[in-house]
Structures are given as C-alpha cells and as structure tokens.
Amino acid sequence: MMAIRNSRLPFLATFTLLVSAVGLPAQILHLERTGGTLGKPLNITVSGDSGQIWLLLPSFHRGPTPLRLFDPRDPRSLSIGMDMFLFFALGSTSTGATVVPVALPNLPSMHGGTIHFQAFAVPGKNSIFGALSNPISSIMGTQFHWAGKKALLKTARVYPSVSPLIPGKLFLVAGGTGGKVAMPPFGLSSTEIYRGDPQDFVKGPKMAVARVMHTASSLGFGRVLMAGGVNANGLVTKTCEIFDLGKGVFLSTGSLAVPRAGHRAVTLPDGRVIVIGGTSDVSTTLKALGAMLKTTEIYNPSTGTWTAGPSLPAPIAGNGAVLLPNGKVLITGGVVLGATNLPGNSTACYLFDPKTNTISTAASLPFATALHSATVLKSGRVLVAGGGALTALITNSGAHGKAALYDPTLNTWTTLTPMTQVRAGHEAVLLKDGRVLLAGGYQGTLFAPKAIPGTVFFDPTTKSFAAGNPMPEARALNGTAVLATGQVLMFGGVGGTLGTPLDSGVFLFF
C-alpha cells in the first residue's frame, strides 16, 4: 500500500544526486487505475521502460504546480497539486509495469470526492524531474452507492447514442436532443468523448447531420456507424455517417433507402449492421404511429452501401433487438397497429438469421411491451424487463414492471416475478458478476411521464429482482457506460416531468 513518508522536498534533491551517477535517461511514464470504492484499494498501474525510477504523487487538487518552484531550470508544470506530497510512493518499473495499491479509508466525508495522481521519473537529464506521466483522476464512493458530478457533460442532452471506442476507457456520445422531450424532437450535431482518465468529457467533432432517435453501431477498429434519426429541423433523415477514431472525424457513407428514426440496429457477427423497423415521421405522435416501418436494411462496411433485408410481418417501433450467442438476432415486442388500426403493444417476437437472410417467428412474450430493455445474460438467455403499457386510449398509456427470460435453445419464455418498481425508458446494464442493473426510467402516462431515481438488480441465479440504492436524481432516456475502472456511469437524460435535459452524471461503486 502507498505509505505516508515523513519527508520534505529536500529529499528529492538528495535522492536525485544519489541516483544520477547511474546515468538513467528521462523516459516515458504512463498511469492507469482501477477501483475507487472507499474501504478498498485503488490500484494505480505505473508503466515505463524496465529499470525506470519514479515517484507517484497523490493530490486532492488539480494543478498546475510549476516545477520551477523546486528547480528553476524546469519550465514545466505538474497537472496536480502538492498538498499530499508526503504520501508519495517511490518505485521502479523493474518489469515494465508496477501496480501501486492505494488504501482508501471508508470515510463518509470522502464520498463523491476526487483524488488525482501523477508520476515523474528521476533524475532528469538537466533537472531534478525527468519524464512526467499523464495525470489521472478517480472519483471515490461508498460501495453500492451513487456519487454524482454536476456539469459532467459539455452539453445537456437527452437520448444520446453511446458507443465504446476503447471498451471501458473511451466512449463516443453523439447527438440526442437538447430541448424538452416532445414530438417532434430536434437533434443535436455535437458529440463528446468520455475519457476514463481523467474521468471527463471533451468535445468531439460535429456530425454532418444533427441526430436524435438514431442508432450508433460499432464497426470495430474505433469506427462507429450513425444511421438515420431526427435532424435539427425535426425531420426524419435517411443519411448515415461514420466516426473514425484514427482520423478524429466523421466520414460520409451510403444512405438508408428510407428515412427512419426510433429503429433498432444490431452489428452482426460478420461485421454487417441490420436496422429494424422505426418510423419515418415524428411530427406528431399519431403520425409517428401511422408511419411505422416493417422493413429492415443491412449495411455492408466493405462497400459502404445498404441493401434491403427481409421484412417483418407488421410495422413496429420501440421494440427490442439483441444479438444471440448463436449469431441470430432476437426482436422483441414493440408498438404495433391492431386490426382496427388502433395502437397497442405487441407480444410478438422474431428471429433474424443472417446466414439465410430470413426472419422467422419466435415464441411470443408472456406480456405485451414496448420501450423495454432486452439484455443478453452470460448464460445466453435474454432478460426482457419493464417498458410502456400502450393502450388504444393513448392518454392512459403508462409503464409496467413485468419481466421474462428467453431461452434461445428451447425457444421459450419464463415469466418472472415483476420488478418492485414499474419503469419504461430505463437503462439495463450487464455487470461483471452476471447480474443486471436496471436504473431510472419514467413512470406515469405517455403525456404526463415522470422520471424516477430508483434502481433494481436482477440476479440470474435466483431469477429475482432486488432493490438497489437510488440515484441522487431522477433520470430517464440517458446514456450509460460500463467503465474499466469498475464503476457504472450514467449521464445526461432528463429528470422530473421530462422537461429539462441534464448535463450531470452519476457513478455507481461496487
């Protein structure tokens, strides 16, 4: 563990004189971290060339700290403060990387606080300080509790797309709407990139077309396909573009055959992308229902073009779509129009087989639902939970807490005991331990919804739900990222009566 050192800055100069005879050159240092839960170690990995000697400094403050305060010859600055210099760790990268466990006391006063770290090599060629590492930060929190950060996003946004560029470490957050949740929504062209260290969002490049209710699909190698959505004028678009991490820009690509928004997209095992259903008009709720689509389209990243896929038996929107371990796509529920052309939720499920390019009927859900979550468990089964309970009288439509498990081997559904709290428009996250976190969402009717802060956990071993600690503020239609550092981050979205977009974020600690 990082220990308290009873030292003063003169030690640094003395130490430098002792090791300077070795003739070590200034080299590159890199820091990464995992953890952040109070009462558990925060592990800092220091990477560098073998034999490199370094000091790791913690601080409760961001810098800069000019190094000329300690060595007039050095014009650089540390990116952290010097308030905790006495708690430094001294080490060397004897095998290229060293893990420094930092003991975090389980003190309630530290919940939600942030600690910063930076390392530097010694000695430098012409200074006490050699190479400086990247600075890293870690928000701290009590186990199983949420810690919030205000103004985490650069722009408040509702219903953005979230795409991992480097899983757990770098995420692209694109589009969404910056206004009140209403029909039609108006898309944003701005993007942001979440950096795992130093746990912040930075502005990304603008999309060529503003988008909300679009899909974002990973093409691998830091490339993400943006398809359709609603533009800045409230019109559904058929345009598409690709974000390229290596180039740091959005690139043009082929357009969809028809405009669509509120559709679902799944990246197939061979790298192609299928989009399913949606609607081509969102000017009003009634027009959105009348313009729902039953078509699918398939994108080929090798050619940058779309081709028609098989059609569904009926138009749908607000459905679920997940990739099964066998390579097929399970399509669940959604909003449909009945025989009398009145809207309702569907129990129908389908399977798309990319090998045969066909859609077949799967076992029906034990309940009708839309705007639900569909999560593939580690066992390969699929958890469908919550969603909207749309009725022919749209003003009475609300949310429900029903749930079921799908077994792809048997093509059967098992009804579960409902969640303790009804919700739609929520987030569902598969955790490392195999459980599923379901958080936030909204209750109330379609025209009088209200965001909720509540959370529940689904345990696949007991097939039951258990209440979790609530988020600090109600949140629905937000973005979510599972971080390599061990936390779950939820950000943006809308609170209260779905009126004001949020720019805040919350971290859940395990």
Image: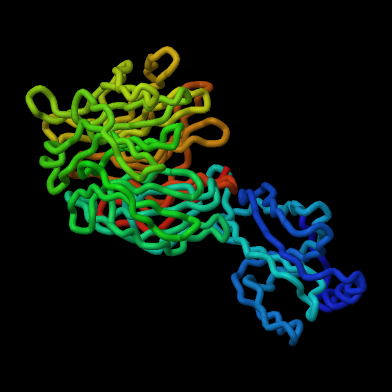
Going by the image, does 240 lie left or right of 3? left
Name the spot of residue 62 as percent of width and height, x first. 59, 70
Residue sticking out furthest to the top: 410
User: Residue 14: where, in percent of width, then height?
Assistant: 88, 76
Q: Give the left or right position of residue 315, taking residue 170 as reference.
A: left
Q: Quadrant of residue 401?
A: top left
Q: Is residue 454 visible?
A: no
- For this orientation, the residue located farthest to the front is 303
The residue nearer to you, when weighing 299 against 507, is 299
Residue 90: percent from left, percent from top:
81, 62
- The answer to whether residue 122 is visible is yes
Quarter holding residue 150: bottom left
For the point 47% across and 33% down, the residue is 436
- Is the image coloured rainbow, by chain, by secondary structure, or in one colour? rainbow
Depth check, front residue: 105 or 439: 439
244, above or below 371, in the image: below
Q: Residue 192 in the image: x percent, y percent?
A: 42, 59
Residue furthest toward the bottom? 72
The residue drawn where x is 58% and y is 42% is: 510
241 displayed left or right of 43 = left
Q: Nearer the viewer, residue 247 or 328?
A: 247
Please report the residue visible at 69 percent of the width from the left and 51 percent of the height from the top. 43
Looking at the rendering, which quadrant does residue 132 occupy?
A: bottom right
Q: Looking at the image, which residue is at 71% across and 84% down? A: 68
